[in-house]
Amino acid sequence: MIEIKGVHKSFGDLEVLKGIDLTVNRGEVVSIIGASGSGKSTLLYCINAIESINKGNIIVDGIDVHDKKTDINALRQNLGMVFQQWNSFPHLTVLENAALAPQVVKGFSKEKAEAIATKELTHVGLGDKLHEYPTKMSGGQQQRLAIARALAMEPPYMLFDEVTSALDPELVGEVLDTLRLLRDDGMTMICVTHEIAFAKEVSDKVAFFHEGLIEEIGTPQEVLDNPQKERTQQFLSKVL
Amino acid sequence: MNLFTPLSWNDTGFILTGILNTVYISVIAIVVGSLLGLLIGFIRAESNKTVNVCLGAILDILRSVPLIIQLILFSTFIGVMGFPLPPFVTGSIILSLYTMAFMSEVFRSGFNSVPTPMIKAARSLGMNYLQTVRYIRIPIGMRAVFPSWIGVALSVIKDSALVSVIGYMELLRTAEQLISRTQQPLMILIGVGLFYFMISYPLSRYGKYIERKMEI
Ligand SMILES: Nc1ncnc2c1ncn2[C@@H]1O[C@H](COP(=O)(O)OP(=O)(O)OP(=O)(O)O)[C@@H](O)[C@H]1O
Ligand SMILES: [Mg+2]
């Protein structure tokens, strides 16, 4: 379970998160929508401690992420993260990209790491590209590689930050299909997304962010079909 | 008795020693200079402005004072101080530091060429700081600057001829001694030039080849 309690975050004078409360249970898919600059990415970065927080707590499976005594690198193994840009490691093959972290972070043997990597890469449909270099692949393939690379650490939670935003329209589908696959596997996920239809389809909960606060949260039917708040209605009328 | 004797096969060993000494001191300077340069380049890529300005000033001195002056200055200095070193040691120290000054800039831009989001992606997989340096930043950054590295290495091989001024018996000094004995400067110097060309040309072609391959 991920528990976010009263989280505040500022960059200098700019307060980006103004008291976020959100709970994500095991097996749940939570989507976060909202205008650009409302703090969606920042919240994800705070969850796996790429960014620090100023106030509040983030607890993952009982462990306080921002406690100084917490082993951040151990914690991050539980929180797979995929970014808008796929950031393939260009000097490694597809297989080596996905096998690197299990080897150096978990200390697995090369064989074991590559076995896990192969399994995850096959799962996302890259089983025939294992020995290619990612720089030669399409954005959609590289984004699926990024997903498999995160999955190879076998995290119970996955955080997705607008993973289709940088893709050409015709490549969005294959990446969304991969996310559907993970949902069907029962993966716990937080998805920041601009794909409203996709959020409606896969989410258990949808949170609408507005200027650093959760303006409205509920089931996709509640938030997306029958939004109660005026700002949610305005946002949806703009993006739909 | 004839003071001058023509070049003969007996001189082969002598010339070979000169060649080996040139290769020897160049390899030492390139290896030591690259390792130190990697360290300094990393420190520069990681540190704040103050540290960088201080380090930069020292490196600027090494880069802008002509190598031949650094060699003479250093060997004279340690002589005056009363602990002279063999020319090979003096030459290795100065040539390595000189190489380091150039290599550190090469490696620094290599480290800076690795995009921050890529490092964040590696961190998000649970890698710690040193692991990202070892597995991401060094291999990606160093690959990017490999052609420049070859360029610096080549100029070090050529600059190593200057170590002859402090008495190190590398190829040029060997040749000078042969010339004064045989009085056949043209042939000998052409031979020396050919040797430098045979080493430099393939290396620079290789560097160009890699550069072109990386552009694609
Ligand atoms: N490292 C940073 N330093 C300073 N300001 C930052 C930093 N990261 C984000 N911000 C600012 O924080 C605010 C929220 O950014 P964030 O990236 O969380 O928004 P977002 O909701 O993800 O937007 P988008 O939909 O454009 O991705 C923005 O105003 C942004 O400029
Ligand atoms: Mg964002």
Image (cartoon, coloured by chain):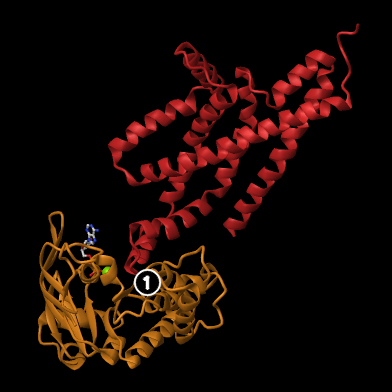
Name the residue type under label 1: Lys
**Residue pictured at 59% horizontal, 39% vertical:** B153
Q: How many marks?
A: 1
**Residue pictured at 49% horizontal, 22% vertical:** B65
**Quarter of the image where ligand 1 sits:** bottom left
Determine the image quadrant of residue B137: bottom left
| Above or below A66: residue B191 | above
Indicate the chain on which mark 1 is placed: A
**Residue pictured at 51% horizontal, 66% vertical:** A92
Q: Name the spot of residue A5 as percent of width and height, x first.
A: 10, 74
Question: Is residue B63 shown left or right of residue A105?
Answer: right
Residue A161 in view, yes or no: no
Question: Is residue B181 shown left or right of residue A99?
Answer: right
Q: Name the spot of residue A231 as percent of width and height, x first.
A: 13, 78
In front of the other: B100 or B7:
B7
Q: Name the spot of residue B164 as percent of width and height, x first.
A: 64, 21
| Above or below A72: residue B63 | above
In front of the other: A214 or B138:
B138
What color is chain A drawn in? orange
Residue wearing tag 1: A106
**Residue pictured at 55% horizontal, 78% vertical:** A129
- Furthest toward the top, the residue is B1
Q: Name the spot of residue A162 as percent of width and height, x first.
A: 32, 75
- The quadrant of the picture occupied by the N terminus of chain B is top right
Determine the image quadrant of residue B9: top right
| Above or below A203: residue B87 | above
Chain (red): B
Q: Secondary structure at mark 1?
A: loop
